[in-house]
Amino acid sequence: MNNKTDPSLPFLIRDKNIQLIRQRFDLVPLVDLADEVDALEDPKDILFVFKTCSNAVTAELFSYLSSLTQERLLQLFTDKQIVDLLNHSYSDDVADFLGELPANLVQRILKNVDASYRDEINQLLRYKEGTAGSIMTPEYITLSKDASVDTALTKIRKIGREKETIQSLFVIDSKRYLIGILTLEDLVYHSGDTSLSSLMSDDFQTCHVHTTQDDVVNLFKRYNLTVLPVLNETNRLVGIITIDDVLHVIEDIASEDILKMAAINPLKDDYKATSSWMITKKSIPWILGLMMIGSISTFAINQFESTFQSVIVLTAFIPMIMNTGGNAGNQSVALITRALATHELSLKDILYIIKKEFTTATIMAITTAFFAFIWIGILLTTQFIRFENITVLYSLAWFSSVAQVSGLVASTLLLSVFVAKLLGSLLPLLAVKIKKDPAIMSSPFLTTIMDFTSLIIYFLFANYLFNFF
Amino acid sequence: MNNKTDPSLPFLIRDKNIQLIRQRFDLVPLVDLADEVDALEDPKDILFVFKTCSNAVTAELFSYLSSLTQERLLQLFTDKQIVDLLNHSYSDDVADFLGELPANLVQRILKNVDASYRDEINQLLRYKEGTAGSIMTPEYITLSKDASVDTALTKIRKIGREKETIQSLFVIDSKRYLIGILTLEDLVYHSGDTSLSSLMSDDFQTCHVHTTQDDVVNLFKRYNLTVLPVLNETNRLVGIITIDDVLHVIEDIASEDILKMAAINPLKDDYKATSSWMITKKSIPWILGLMMIGSISTFAINQFESTFQSVIVLTAFIPMIMNTGGNAGNQSVALITRALATHELSLKDILYIIKKEFTTATIMAITTAFFAFIWIGILLTTQFIRFENITVLYSLAWFSSVAQVSGLVASTLLLSVFVAKLLGSLLPLLAVKIKKDPAIMSSPFLTTIMDFTSLIIYFLFANYLFNFF
């Protein structure tokens, strides 16, 4: 319900108008304000903004800034300022931005926090990116099963504000094993002397610190969770993942898949935060690799040169044959890869998939071939595509040649679309089988294989046809 | 924490073992049980399972079933059973499954619910798919600002269990305008006589019933929301969207983008629920359309036939030139389309994007051309690709010809990769400008344009080179 207010932030900073800057902090959501701060050229201006407001506000604002701005700012901070910032941040936010910083800065920061907090952060930093451990937060409330609703509420009122969520509460036994979950609602619905053990649910999902993000997302979706407890190697509760963190993970996974399917290695950062050099580094190996693999198509054409030299019009249909096979295959790759990513399909569905894709492939191959026969007939008859022919234009023999060329391209497409569909659905499954990401069997990779396959089909058919007649 | 238990459900049904079926309902999460029920062949078996357990449980189980099973089951239900089912379902769940049912069944169902509930469902059915109205739920708690914490808690305890969430509470004035939001936490943290007006936050995000899902997702992400109030045309509160619904929307949007980028019109249902015919219907228009547009490449090759006939080896490099241009362009399309979809970039960033892509394009074009020159030199020198040449093998004149061909392909790639990158980043922006989905300017579409462009560059360069020397 907020609108950005004039005058602009740089203007207010130049005027050192502390009062209006503070007012802006009240009016504009911090995440929007972070965009304005990110846009400031001079780090000293950013520092000025930070000094105008309270530590709790700056800690939150800091977490929204781009990693570049965070780094520039930390270089300017005194040790005292770093301590203030850290004490007002959630430990998972701190672990997040530490992951992006140069090592010397990380050292300086860790030096400035007290021992127990440092342990918490180090613990979070220990888990590999992409695991449940790396996205969990250790800030949640645990209760004992013998406690009553009133005891629980007293504890929540005392320490709840420092925790990431008090919406879900975790009941543990004396050895820190998780034995039940309850919600704030449960407490509200029951009288103060009710024992937690009678309220808590012992039927809940959990994951381990090394569970992949992908599996975490799947648990949230499948069981409509709002929170997921994370257990360590000894099955003790060490953290929780909340649904708002999962939102960002889902988007990141989808982005990675889309980039992989377009033959780019996933970027670590946003588009804006990634340099042209880094984008090139992520893209160029695929371009060059595919070019090398694609040389087999060059080789194939080279081998069949004599066929082309005798019926030169055949060259003109190479792009159409290559593209149609590639497009048809890519559609299957996208459908299957996506269904695998959302866990709708898995490797055990392989027979179902083959059966279904076989039907689809047959229908599509026949339709495409039929359409191509007519379309190429039109292109040749109208002389949009001209071809040298010894007989008289529009004679019976001429029409027979038109039918031969159209028929050749159509039957090539018939077989090539069919193969492309089956290959396009099997390659992602093969990737899963050999424990690779199916998105890697991506469009460009399949396209390159299909180019060669389609060309070979085309040449073999052509050779047969024009030697036979 | 559950494992599926033996014996299998079909076995229990055959034995009419009601007790073990009921036990299964307690042990297995309902969403997992729904998979087992979906797999039952005979609808009568499903009906049997439904009869064994309470109405509240069946209503939830029903919401997890596939739309096909839901439909088969409803056909078998008596009117009484339908009433029981509906009375125990949330109205947004009902609206969801009604949206998938044939009209006569919808009529029969609406006939069986009472008037106020019917209004609620009809209201939800009124909103177009993909809008906030279509995913909101009208089941939330409203409070008056003059109420105290105790009054609020009493109301929650009385009606809260029927509502989708009591985590967020909505304060409205006498005209149903939303004036504040508070959370259950706020109530817990404050004493019973505190007035809600002093607790509630009047600084919140809202959306309208016609807001797109895409914008809803963006609000949730940007402001870390867990709930978003939905206002109608007169700005009155009519529903809320909760974060768990957004999870599924994000996935659906990503799936749609991936399919669009592979030239398939988005499926309405999951892969499994979509027939081969429907998949063909969504895929074939693109295959045929792109084939027709691709005919310009056929035309181009046809026009330059004489060049090919004189230097026949040039034909062999057509696939390499087409693919490399296409791949390079697709990388940019994917990067820009994804950044637009996640709202990292927007149309106003156009100058930034052009500047950045210009740099990337230059680096990549030079790298690719340099690599191609060497690679094709190797292919020709090693005679992996053979070419007819009047001079003696490995003579100076022969090497000069090798350099000519490699140089021709390399300079074609230089220009074509450069154009592909720029085109690949501008086309998605153009789509946004003309208010189309950028994913439509997808890989296959760009590939088809780039094929033609690359071929023309190749032919013009070849003509110039071989007429000149």
Image (spheres, coloured by chain):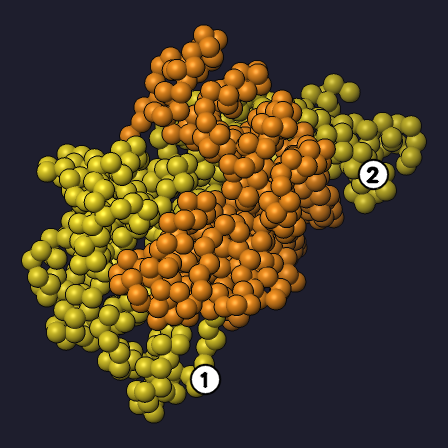
Chain colours: A orange, B yellow
Residue under pointer 2: B378
Q: Position of residue A89 (x, y in %)?
A: 52, 38
Left or right placement of residue B392 versus residue A330 in this view: right
Left or right placement of residue B303 versus residue B73 in this view: right
Name the chain letter of the residue that bears numbered label 1: B
Separation of disc 1 and disc 2 at Cα? 64 Å
Left or right placement of residue A235 versus residue A287 in this view: left
The image quarter containing residue B328 is top right
The image shows residue B388, relative to residue A443, as above or below, that is: above
Residue under the point 78% across and 20% down: B469
Front residue (pair B305, A435)? A435
Residue under the point 64% across and 45% down: A115
Give the secondary structure at mark 2.
Answer: helix
The image shows residue B233, relative to residue A428, as above or below, that is: above
Can residue A74 be seen here? The reply is: no
Give the secondary structure at mark 1.
Answer: loop
The image quarter containing residue B69 is bottom left
Front residue (pair B162, A121)? A121
Left or right placement of residue B422 versus residue A396 in this view: right
Front residue (pair B140, B201)? B201
Residue under the point 41% across and 36% down: B222
